[in-house]
Amino acid sequence: MTTLILKRLGLGLFTLWLVSVLVFAGTEILPGDVAGAILGQNATPESLAALRTQLGLDEPALMRYLGWLGGITHGDLGQSLANHRPVAELLWPRFWNTMALAAYAGVIAIPLAVSLGILAAARRGRFFDRFANIAALALVSLPEYFLGLLLILGLSVRTGWLPSLADTYEGMGLVDWFRATTLPMLVLVMVTMAQILRMTRTTVLGVMDQPYIETAFLKGLRNGRVVLRHATPNAAAPIVNVVSFNIAYLITGVVLVEAVFNYNGLGRFMVDAVSKRDLPMVQGAAIVFGAAYVLLNMIADIAAIALNPRLRHPRAKGA
Amino acid sequence: MNRIPLTAWIGLFLIGLNLVLFLFGPLLAPFGQEEIVGAPFDGPMPGHWLGFDQNGRDMLSRLLYGAQMSIGVSLGAVVLSFSIGIPLGFFAAIRGGWVDLALSRLVDTVMSIPVLISALVVLQALGSSLPVLIVTIACLDSTRVFRLARLVAQGINVMEYAEVARLRGEGLWWMIRKEILPNALPPLVAEFGMRFCFTFLFVAGLSYLGLGVQPPFADWGGMVRDNQQGILYGLYAPLFPAAAIALVTIGVNLVVDWMLAGRTIVQGDNR
Amino acid sequence: MSEILKIRDLRVETASGLELLHGISLDLAKGEILGLIGESGAGKSTIGLAAMGYGRGGCRISGGTIELAGTELASASLRQREAVRGARIAYVAQSAAAAFNPAQRLEQQIVEGPLRHGVMTAAEARAWMLELFTALQLPEPEAFGRRYPHQVSGGQLQRAMVAMAMACKPDILVLDEPTTALDVTTQIEVLALLRETIHKYGTSALYITHDLAVIAQIADRLIVLRDGAEIESGTTEQILEAPRHEYTRRLVAERAESLTAAPGAHHRTGETLLALSGVAAGYGSKPVLAGIDLTVRRGETVAIVGESGSGKSTLARVVAGLLPPSEGLLDFADAPLPPSYTKRPRDLLRRIQLIYQLPDVALNPRQSVAETIGRPLELYRGLKGRALRAEVAHLLGLIGLAPEMADRLPGALSGGQKQRVCIARALAAKPDLMICDEVTSALDPLVAEEILRLLRRLQDDFGMTYLFITHDLSVVRRLADRTVVMQQGRIVEAAETETLFTAPQEAYTQRLLDSVPQLDRGWLDRVLTARGG
């Protein structure tokens, strides 16, 4: 099992490297002209050439990549083209803002959704199951900004309970922070909860198809115990995958939600950078998002390996 | 499938309705999509059943025009992504070996970055035009299609009837056309619905961020963005295009859900 | 005798309303073992589960009464049925490997029943489990329960399943094909221990099987079932010696004949068709076959017999070119045979045909019978249009299917019909050698017998050559000219079938022959005494 986990770790590092290659290739090799994008309409051939030299665009792509990668490993993400400030300095505070919002939503959504998903599986075909299923299906189908606008209308504009925009600033009090971020949190919770609930239910029901579930029923065990003690442990590994998949989703879903509530996170940071075609900023944000995603997937896979009884308890020698 | 449940009927109705809007939307629109016919954010009134948008254009007409753009872009992207993903997935599954390894590795890497992030990276490099949008989304999305197609084809390829065909000396074309495709169709059709939903929301999301379909074209995601300010004054304007988006995805999801239901057997249902 | 279980006019239907059992009645006395015998779809398992008040996959009891030790189960509430289930009546499944929860230790699953039903304390349940482990001769009873299901062998797991069923000291055991998934040599041990355990604790049992010879060793009375209805019932002796109903007579006669007919076939044989010398093969670094020498002459049937893991199916895959050997030479019709099928020219592919164990997965569910049979004709013989249709009809006639079947999809055929279509597909290629890999193992006895008869007839009519792979010695008896016994990837013994059956040279062959259950009731006792002595 240790070998398997080490292998997965190695694969994770390899993937991280591939992600850096892909981000670099996507931003610099695709036939867009960065210098042209910066100068826009006013570009003259001379000013273009000068800017290209200044940005180091004349060097071969491989050299630029190595330089860029070397910078990243030291925490240097380059300089913003728009205001010439270091990308890292601008990026990390926004990253932590996003993480805080995602964590706020995740802490509430994940335990709730997994338990409701198991409950729906246990009460399959009954009222609760049908209701949860339809509600979850509707929530999955609704775009984040639709939910966001509804919440703003209901909980903010009409009632004045919560602020409609999630304005946060440094040194803000904890209570104010929670007040400001509750609406975006609610949207994220609704969307991820619906996904996790549906997928947890499907996973548990998938296990309910197995003969050992019938064995458990034939032992005279009650439905609740069969679901909790016999089905769920066997569904644990896939459920971990479902959860990690949705945390990953949480990280990108945040982009839209941040836009709705004007929240100062990495998602909006990246969208702004893309609109301004500020290349180093886009690269920085993409690599941070990519790395977070790869790490989450890796953790989930390792957890799934650790949860597999066949791997945890290998065949004894001579048995 | 002897009995179609109510939810599936609702889904089928919504899909049918949107298909009509997609095909004939602009013909049904009472006003032009750029025509200013009233005051900004004015409420519903006879002749303008959904009121006006932020520039005083007829909301209903813009919704009808937008249908073609929103649904068309996503439909185009999904069709393209399936035409890339399925052949490659089948090919990788049948050939195996290094072809499979290389393709799978590439796909895994692309998939290890969130789609939205990859799309943003490409859009910042190439700018946001309709062809770029469709091709980018199709390429990114085809990784998912590839995975499923490969998985399904692998499952079929190890079946003994596929082995019989190989032992008979059948070529690649026969294997794909006669042995794999007919048996892979049901899961792929369901996947088409799910991918469409995802892509549709995705295109709308990009437009909402201002990075998708660009003006002057009307599209639902962009309309939400343009009218969003209205919500702060308690106006419903941005909710109309958002609800239109939701109705499409709900419709498709309901039908996909019905198609996938009944596939799983559960023990102990009649204890 | 006091009846512990009384079933009257039991009817069970599926969720969609199709009736599976059409009024079954039976009585089970205390300490009695009642055998339920029949082919697949006869409703044997459905009866066993209904006796526990349980319907599999949404089936429900739609009529009749089930009286278990005075409690009526058919109309009882869920809570009442749950209280009885596992406590008074318990279930042993065919595949223990699938029936144990892979995520829990064996002892956890075994003591769960008694603790949940509140019939024992944890210490009592554990002590009783250890007693059962000892009675069932499981190794190191103390440590055994600490294992996970995947950590023990198939035979041990099947015995652990019996221990789990016995955990609450139930009145009745429902044994659903408890030895069918095991190898013949393991089957004997489990069968003997099962019988001993049941007798020792005075438990009653419903024993469900399709195998007359197995049930003859253990049941006091038999009920023969077909299509959800009783055909005949009586004591075991009476059914075996004087069956009244025609179906039962055929069942008994076929089985008796396959066990007692003069062994060995004698076909006119020609030159050497297939020769393997020093063949070794394996998957990855794991060797499965080693040092295989084998020749097959034109016109003869060579049977390869072995238990699971003997490498017999791997041998078939090597000959078919699906698994290139790591060592050794293959010759076919006096020319070297390319190791991989991808390197064999089309005509060579045509000359070697393979028929599989499971016709369900060997037929493309989306191709009609005519397409399936017609494709080799098209590919190898260039037939088209009317000539193609005529040849398909001819082949259908050969295998005994009506011409109307040509347009059906495999889903609309029975298991036996599917296997016939597979045979026709192989025949269509006009092969020199047919490899039959366990072709009758998945079929009901009477259907299997018909398929064997068809294969024999094809051999007589066309001088076909078969390489016949099976785990079942009784199949080989009348079919094969020569028989090769394999164990752990090697050939143990190869001889004329007649010689092998009457005067085996190797101990393993003898043991294999002894393990084939015989129809007479004393067989198990005789084998056990012979082994003990």
Image (tube, rainbow, N blue to C red):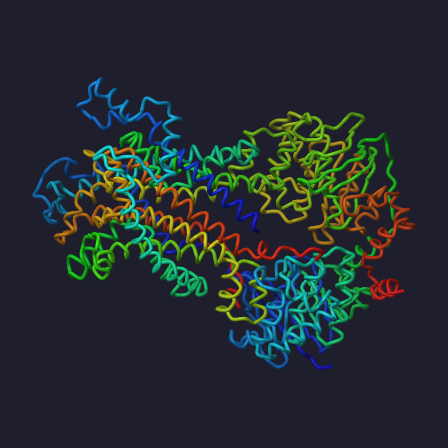
**A296 displayed left or right of B96:** left
Question: Residue placed farthest to the left in the image?
Answer: B39
Q: Residue at x 79, y 65 (%)?
A: C217
Residue C384 appears in the picture as rendered: yes
**Quarter of the image holding residue C160?**
bottom right
Instruction: Give coordinates of residue A249: x percent, y percent.
Output: 36, 48
In the image shown, does C81 or C14 lie closer to the viewer? C81
Question: Residue placed farthest to the front in the image?
Answer: A74
In the image shown, does A317 or C485 lie closer to the viewer? A317
In the image shown, does A300 or C387 lie closer to the viewer? A300
Instruction: Give coordinates of residue C304: x percent, y percent.
Output: 79, 44
**Quarter of the image holding residue C432?**
top right
Q: Residue at x 41, y 41 (%)?
A: B192
| C394 versus C101 height, above or below | above
Instruction: Give coordinates of residue B102: x percent, y percent.
Output: 51, 33
Task: Locate the C terminus of chain A by quadrant.
Answer: bottom right
**C433 displayed left or right of A103:** right
Q: Residue at x 36, y 40 (%)?
A: B115
**How many callouts does the rendering have?**
0
| A36 versus C454 height, above or below | above
| B271 versus B33 height, above or below | below
In the image shown, does A119 or A63 lie closer to the viewer? A63
**A228 displayed left or right of C499:** left
Residue C246 appears in the picture as rendered: no
**Quarter of the image holding residue B31?**
top left
